[in-house]
Image (spheres, coloured by chain):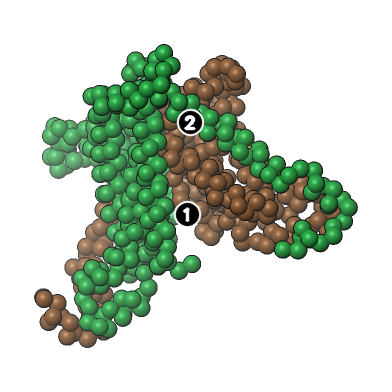
Amino acid sequence: MSGAGRAAVTPTVVARRRARSPRQVALKWAFLLACIAYFVLPLLGTLLFSLRSQPFLSAFTDTLNDPQFYSSLEYSFVIGIVTIVVSIVLLVPTAFWVRLRLPRLRPIVEFVTLLPFVVPPIVLVFGLITTFSRPPLPLTGSNLGSDVLLVCAYVVLSFPYMYRAVDTGLRSMDIRSLTEASQSLGAGWLTILWRVILPNLRVALLSGSFLTLAIVVGEFTIANFLARPMFAPYLQLISGNLAYEPAAVAVISFAITWAAMGAISLLGRGSRSKIQVGGAR
Amino acid sequence: MTSDARPAPAARAGRRRLGPQWLGVVPFFAFAALFLLIPISYLVVGSFQDQQGNVTVQNYLNLSRPITASAYMASIEISFVTALLGGLLGFLLAYVVIAGGIPGPFRSGVMTFSGVASNFAGVPLALAFIFTIGRTGFVTVILREVLGLDLYGSGFTIYSKIGLEIVYLYFQLPLMVLIIAPAIDGLRRDWREAAEGMGATSYHYWRYIALPILLPSLLGSMILLFGNAFGAQATAFALTGGFINLVTILIGGQLSGDVLGDRNLAYALAMGMVAIMGVTILAYTWLTRRAERWQRS
């Protein structure tokens, strides 16, 4: 064995040599810099391209003067917020009730909330269109119906990390004692959920909400096939027609993702769900 | 455990007798049934029917047709390559910033950026790469004007399989950093010191201690990356305008214009995809359970 000679070296010497080998340090930094370059160059490229428009910054001013830009952004945010509300209203009582009274159902609920990982968005929207384009519930026939379908699809997409966030949050508090204390003070279930459980879940829910918002605002596949005027389909549309504006819109979209993710990391790492496979790919 | 047995105030007891316990989860299951389970079962049922509605497995046999088979091959190839590369590079990056003696700010910077970049995807990401190494992208131009390296002259194009793989790595690599970081954190310093105390070299340490402990996490994470790329549609669509034959793109084409000319074949195509994703997630779950044994809780 070639290691036999080295084995005689004392541990401290080995440790010191590992820490100071200049070749390793150089390799390490070279690798790190290559990674940084790979991640920064596309962002830089987008920014530079958006600045190439004449007159200076006109890509941004044109974008900000485009009513469709605002309407798609506004529509996406409204859909995102409705999605978050529905998701919370649906999942918080469920997770609470399952923890408190039906622990035997937990594996089943967990399984259902993880299904969106197995069913990619394209398959989900395929199923939804197949199901809801015919009686008894022809939702795709009207704008309102399609909006409802879009929100419901996004709520399904939010299941994995929202449920996980809520469940982790519930685990960290003594919901049995809290519930009993509230009940002995005369609180009903709604009061308990609204005034005791929800405030305690604030951090977990906020980080789940920002993740949902970032994913919904950037979501393309489902929005595109349901023909909804969302932000990502708008960006796709103008990228075929205009030169510099798409770069400006992409820069703005990166900024939105940064803001949402920055908010999550500000809220603390502890409550962040482990798996972050979103639906926007 | 006393809550049910203790004599309760009237109001509380009354409220509790309104219905059986399971009524509390009805809204959730009703929602999941309506918008997830029933739509999927429509696809399942349709995939086992022919155009006239007779029961058949012909649709699944038809998946071996050139168009669907090559879509699966391309999807699997791209997912495999980006999972392997993204997994290895992501692991290296995570290891370097966590255990490599890099200054602290770098570590938190890389971790935060990974959280963001793993969510950069879809149309804006595709555009960013087109602006960068597209035909007129600034890196392409710099390489040509300054270094005399003509990317597009040498046959490279961002709108190809390799191009798509380069783009996918942008979210695959950071995702790997995020999910492998806890496992690297779990490598205890004393294990290395104990090994060195007994005369082990770096090679011995990695071969007999670190790698066997990390292996389930590494494999599990790469499998998750595979599924992550396999289900992706928006990025590929935005980059190539739909002119690349992937399973997700083919399903999309069927949805907007019946490219297969056979709806039931499309159902089978989608189900094959769900089956592959299912195996992926099962393998991931199994491997993470194994990996968690070594992690500090």
Crowding at dot 2, Cα within 10 Å, few <14 / some 14-19 / many 20+, comes out as many
Indicate left or right for A265 with B110 as reference.
right
**Front residue (pair B91, A71):** B91
Query: Judging from the image, what secondary structure is the residue with disc 2 in?
Result: helix
**Looking at the picture, which amino acid does disc 1 mark?**
Lys
- Residue furthest to the top: B52
Q: Residue at x 74, y 48 (%)?
A: A194
Indicate left or right for B150 with A216 as reference.
left
Where residue A137 sits, quadrant-wise, is top right
Query: Judging from the image, what secondary structure is the residue with disc 1 in?
Result: loop
Colour in which the image shows chain B: green
How far apart marks 2 and 1 lie (CA) works out to 26 Å
Rendered position, A183 above or below B23: below
Residue B166 coordinates in the image, percent (x, y): 27, 41
**Front residue (pair B127, B146):** B127
Task: Report the chain shown in brown.
Answer: A
Residue A263 coordinates in the image, percent (x, y): 54, 50
Crowding at dot 1, Cα within 10 Å, few <14 / some 14-19 / many 20+, comes out as some
Q: Which residue position holds label 1? A: A274
Looking at the rendered image, the disc whose residue lies closer to the viewer, 2 or 1, is 2
Residue A232 coordinates in the image, percent (x, y): 46, 30
Q: Residue at x 34, y 15 (%)?
A: B261
**Looking at the picture, which amino acid does disc 2 mark?**
Ile
Q: State whether discs 2 and 1 lie on one chain.
A: no
Q: Which residue position holds label 2? A: B40
Indicate left or right for A63 with A138 as reference.
left
Indicate left or right for B112 with B5 as reference.
left
Q: Residue at x 33, y 51 (%)?
A: B222
Q: Residue at x 12, y 82 (%)?
A: A5
Q: Quadrant of the N terminus of chain B?
A: bottom right
Chain for numbered disc 1: A
Chain for numbered disc 2: B
